[in-house]
Amino acid sequence: MAITEHKDIEKGDNKGLEDLVEPLIDEDGSKDCKETDHNGSISMVLLSTAVAVCRSLEFGSCVGYSAPVQSDISIDLNLSVAEFSLFGSIVTIGAITSGRIADTIGRKGAMALSAVFCIAGWLAIFSSMGSLLLDSGRFFTGYGIGIFSFVVPIYIAEIAPKNLRLTTLNQLMSVTGSSISFLLGTVVSWRTLALTGLVPCILLLVGLLFIPESPRWLAKVGREAEFERSLRKLRGAKADIFAEADEIHETILTLQSLPRARLLDLFNAKYIKPVMIAVGLMVCQQSGGINGIGFYASETFQTAGLSSGKAGTIAYALIQIPVTMIGVVLMDKSGRRALLMVSSSGTFLGCFLAGTLFFFKGQAIFLEWVPLLAVSGVLVFIALFSIRMGAVPWLIMSEIFPLHIKGAAGSLAVLVNWFGAWTVSYSFNFLINWSPAGTFSSPSLWFSG
């Protein structure tokens, strides 16, 4: 599942209704926001961010769980390919109600609820003796991280001063969580690995006791006294918060005055081009097969001819973190389009290499080289995808829509993305059993297009 990055559409200068209905992008493509210096300490902002990104570790633990344990779970619980595919893919259904939950019970409330769902899910997986409880646990963890994936980036964006960018930390920690799960899965049992997923949830629940609610959400629901206390706690006891408080109120009032768009409004002639761009990027991102490769990496490496998938899984885990850091650095320096083209070209190369080598294996050609080179192709795919193919589509989507239709457009993009994630993650095991070469050739055609 590709990791989603959300931008705070409520942060930025207020220019009046006529400007707010246009995308908040200036001529060089950056967001139109004015940096504000805050007196006082940012220690509470950093603490709140550290607590929130425990969610990112949990997200990574959940999406990385199925890859190293596929063989052991299938043997211990006597699962068929179809049963394990359902278990692996059911995690992708959790983002549907996340926005409404975050707006109803607040950012902290949504994070706490998510942690409870994830804890229940991991305990169910740990104690499962058959597919029913196993799938129920995976469903609960998927629902939990679906809410997490929406609310945490928004919370981080809403508490941070404009001159402090922390949203990239969210994705980096998600990848770190996935890599940790991959590595631990090679040395501990699948039940023990499920218990390790509890750790980020417990840290999050404890941390929520010490951090403030999002001041923007408090202002939006009219809790003025709590809004001022939260903002002062985040900016420091001696900080002048009145200018920022006025700006937040003005932004909320202006946003509330904008017309509320429906999904049908997206098909208006003046919006159809950005809609096609956003949906097209999501389709291409998911059709590349990232969730199938990521969810079942260990089994893929064994199919390539490795005696055990552990070595490939360890390499997968170790390569994700540094290349994601490279992508974070390059995001604003190289431009969205250039980075997207480099990343998609590299993923095409990785799929093409893996598909070709799987074809050679089927024809009994270069058998001594097939395992190493096929695994290399998969690792090239992962490395270049991590550089930004996973994040850039979400970032582009956040920048190309006017504010008054951004909610409807985001809902459509999330629906397309998560449906694609489920389709790929459910069908991948069947496809690779049918034709490994064909499985990797299809994504290469998407990326080359």
Image: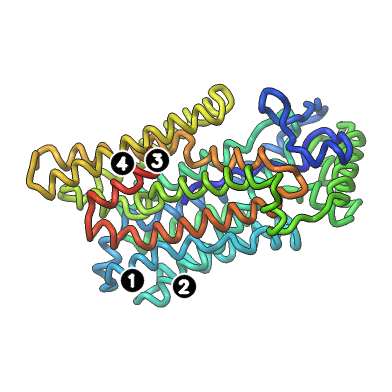
Which is more foreground, mark 3 or mark 2? Answer: 3
- Judging depth in this view, the residue of 37 and 4 nearest the camera is 4
Q: Which residue is mark 2?
A: 136
**Which amino acid type is marked by label 1?**
Glu
Disc 3 or 2, which lies upstream in sequence? 2
**Residue at the image position 37 percent from the left and 33 percent from the top:** 346
Horizontal and vertical percent position of residue 319: 36, 36
Q: Is residue 228 above or below residue 388?
A: below
> Marks 2 and 1: which is nearer the front?
1
Which one is nearer the viewer's eye here, 143 or 402?
402
Position of residue 87 in the picture relative to residue 160 (left or right): left
Q: Which residue is mark 3?
A: 447
Say whether marks 4 and 3 touch (CB < 8 Å). yes
Circle 3: residue type: Phe
Alpha-carbon span between mark 3 and mark 2: 34 Å
Identify the residue under disc 4: 351
Earlier-in-chain disc, 4 versus 1: 1
Give the mark nearest the N terminus, 2 or 1. 1
Marks 4 & 1, CB-CB < 8 Å contact: no
Question: Disc 2 marks which amino acid?
Answer: Ser
Spatial CA span between label 4 and label 2: 33 Å
Cα distance between the residues tagged 2 and 1: 13 Å
Specify few, some or many for label 1: CA neighbours under 10 Å numbering under 14, 14-19, or 20 or more.
Answer: some
Mark sitting on residue 225: none
